[in-house]
Image (cartoon, rainbow, N blue to C red):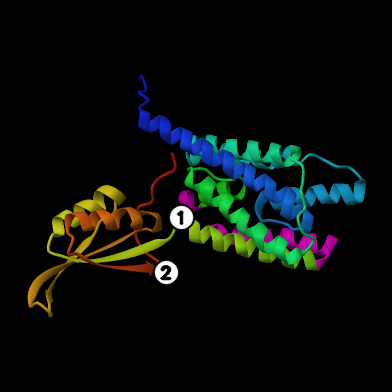
Amino acid sequence: MIKVFTASTIGTKIKRLLLITLAAALSAVNIKTFVRAGGLLPGGFTGLTLLIQECFLQFAGIEIPFSFVYFLFNCIPVIISFRFIGRRYTLYSVLMIVLSGLLIDFLPGYPITDDILLLAVFGGGINGVASSLCLLAGASGGGTDFIAIFISEKYGRDAWNYILAGNIVILAVGGWLFGWEKALYSILFQFTTTQVLNYLYRRYQKITLFVITNHTEAVFEVIKVNTNHGATVFHGHGCYNNAERDLVYSVVSGDEVRRVIPKIKQVDPAAFINVVRSKQVSGRFYLRPND
């Protein structure tokens, strides 16, 4: 089969590559400027790698490259992701892993403050932005992300609690070896990262749409085509105008809302739309597969 590359597909690939490159550069600058200056421990394999580096440096006087340890940890998760999650997703993620690892080793550090609180807050924020850019490019930073997605998709179980437990172990070991103050500030770093990530990247958020309309089929078609989600229609009576109206009920992903609402307004400018964030959804919910 001969693959045909259109301007659209080439543009998408270039956009993904640029986002990953920017994410890797931001991540590396963050590690050299904020994380290492404050002695902080990020979550996942990045934090574990930094912890091992610090242990070798403090107790053996040996400075080992970040990229060597980081690549070693990611070997098995990359294989799992390539086989079970998605090949392109894995290849783009490997690009993120390689670029960030090498840049962390070769970029010079520029500590800008010795205030550990500022380092934790702003470092966590930048880390959240870098992670969001990577996710928007259809990739991840690797490591524990691969493991969490594999467990969630393969076994239908939420693996993030296990990842959190692993991060707690890393922080506990770091606090015991190098002081609890930095470990506690590292929790603030991770919290800030999570808040920024939740704000910027909304794929895993569930949003309920209540659309009151007279153009039921057209509204449902917009939802189906743009999100691949279904909908349920309730027939009702508008008390203000004493008119028959339909209520279209659907649950979509958070990153799909901004795309769907303008298109609903195009097919029915008079539609009344109520957007509600859903805390938990039980049942079948379509989530776009990783490519």
Residue 77, percent across and down? 60, 42
Q: Nearer the viewer, residue 165 or 29?
A: 29
Q: Nearer the viewer, residue 76 or 100?
A: 100
Q: In the image, which residues are magenta?
A: 152-180
* 188 left or right of 289 in image: right
Please report the residue visible at 73 percent of the width from the left and 57 percent of the height from the top.
41
In the displayed structure, 32 sits above or below 200; it is above
Q: Is 164 colored magenta in this rendering?
A: yes
* 178 left or right of 145 in image: right
Q: Amino acid at mark 2?
A: Lys
Residue 16, percent across and down? 49, 38
Give the quarter of the figure containing the N terminus.
Answer: top left
Instruction: Residue under label 2, please give it.
Output: 279
Instruction: Residue under label 1, please give it.
Output: 156
Q: Amino acid at mark 1?
A: Gly
Q: Is 168 colored magenta in this rendering?
A: yes
- SS for tag 2? loop
* 47 left or right of 92 in image: right
